[in-house]
Image (cartoon, rainbow, N blue to C red):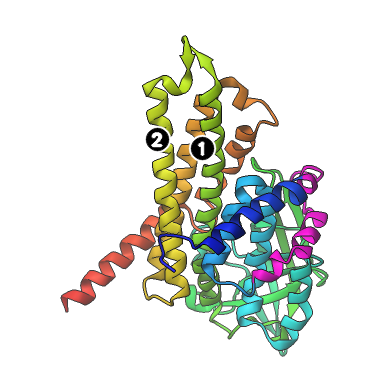
Amino acid sequence: MSAFSLGPEQTAWCAELRELAAERLRPLADRGEPGRVNRPLLAELGRLGLLARLFDSGALDLCLMRESLAQTCTEAETALALQGLGAHPVHAHGTPAQRERWLPRVADGSAVAAFALSEPGAGSDAAALTLAAEPDGDGWRLTGAKCWISNAPEADFYTVFARTTPGAGARGVTAFLVPADRPGLTGSPLEMISPHPIGTLGFDAVPVTAGDLLGEPGRGFAVAMGTLNLFRPSVGAFAVGMAQAALDATVDHTSRREAFHGRLMDLQAVSHQVAEMALRTEAARLMVYAAAAAHDAGAADVPRRAAMAKLLATETAQYVVDTAVQLHGARALRRGHLLEHLYREVRAPRIYEGASEVQRGIIAKDLYATAQKEAR
């Protein structure tokens, strides 16, 4: 398969996903409570086999799922993505016992997963995290706080990144699987601009053992970055899906809306803006697909490609949704309008899983490192 086009089977699958999202997932999403985990929606994603596919597919399939769902039901897209983000470290680095206990329940939607990396003072600078894992007999005690954690505090387990070696930067971080019922683990929800379930976590000497390790001690940063390298292109796919939904709504609106003795589409200022929206959306889509294909092929430049894809797609989606709101006028600002919903949804992806500024830093660092190697 070319990185720049989809085959007929993939195109048909994407169309099927959009139809399923409209008919079976959208009604469940509408009945959910904003800012809370929607377990009926997760259960339906499980029944449809989409959650299980998180563990059987590569980056491109993940991107196609996220883009297709986002066009019709962003809540379903987000629920799927958060399950994958929280559970991927277990799938990739977990022990047989961890995988057997949790992955089937993640796949059927009965267990909610969460990825607990960010802290009040360590968001984009993930290597600066301070959650302390202090030695305690054969295990550790986790003490500190996490913040901006999706699915917190309602998740059933958390992939938690803690510092086992003080002062060692990225080399002193270890990943743990922490069930939500561990003593000393508490949390509270946060009210955000978008309707996602996000909260804080408090760790008051939470006990963990060698059986809770994900990967090797001191190698947790690699676990985190491997997960993010997989999911960053798919954040771009989420953004592309939202941009496409906004573009489709704008084409429909401007082709029907009468103004200034004609339709909006007949005004060159409008039609050229719509063309620009389409151009940027397609460019972002192609970069996302290329980054996903590079990941699946095991290319050496995946971190740079993933950063480029997330950066371009999320910035593009912000532009496209904002332009769509402008061309729709006041109706798009009314609570419940598709674009009002997308306008609230589209802002966060430019920040989470590495803000746009962080992505530029990753790209630049890789470019200079490559240039130095070639100059030797």
Element type where label 2 sits in the image:
helix
Left or right of residue 206, residue 276 in this image: left
- Local packing at callout 1 (Cα closer than 10 Å; few below 14, some 14-19, many 20+) is many
Proximity of marks 2 and 1: CB atoms separated by less than 8 Å? no
Q: Looking at the image, which is closer to me, 117 or 34?
A: 34
Q: Where is the C terminus found, in terms of image quarters? A: bottom left
Q: Where is the N terminus found, in terms of image quarters? A: bottom left
Element type where label 1 sits in the image:
helix
Dot 2 or dot 1: first in sequence order is: 1
Q: Quadrant of residue 249?
A: top right
Q: Looking at the image, which is closer to me, 347 or 107?
A: 107
Percent x, y of residue 88: 63, 72
For the point 73% across and 73% down, which residue is it? 178
Q: Looking at the image, which is closer to me, 359 or 124?
A: 359
For the point 66% across and 25% down, which residue is it? 334
Left or right of residue 330, residue 128 in this image: left
> What residue sits right under mark 2 in the picture?
275
Which range is magenta?
Answer: 27-54
Percent x, y of residue 239: 53, 49
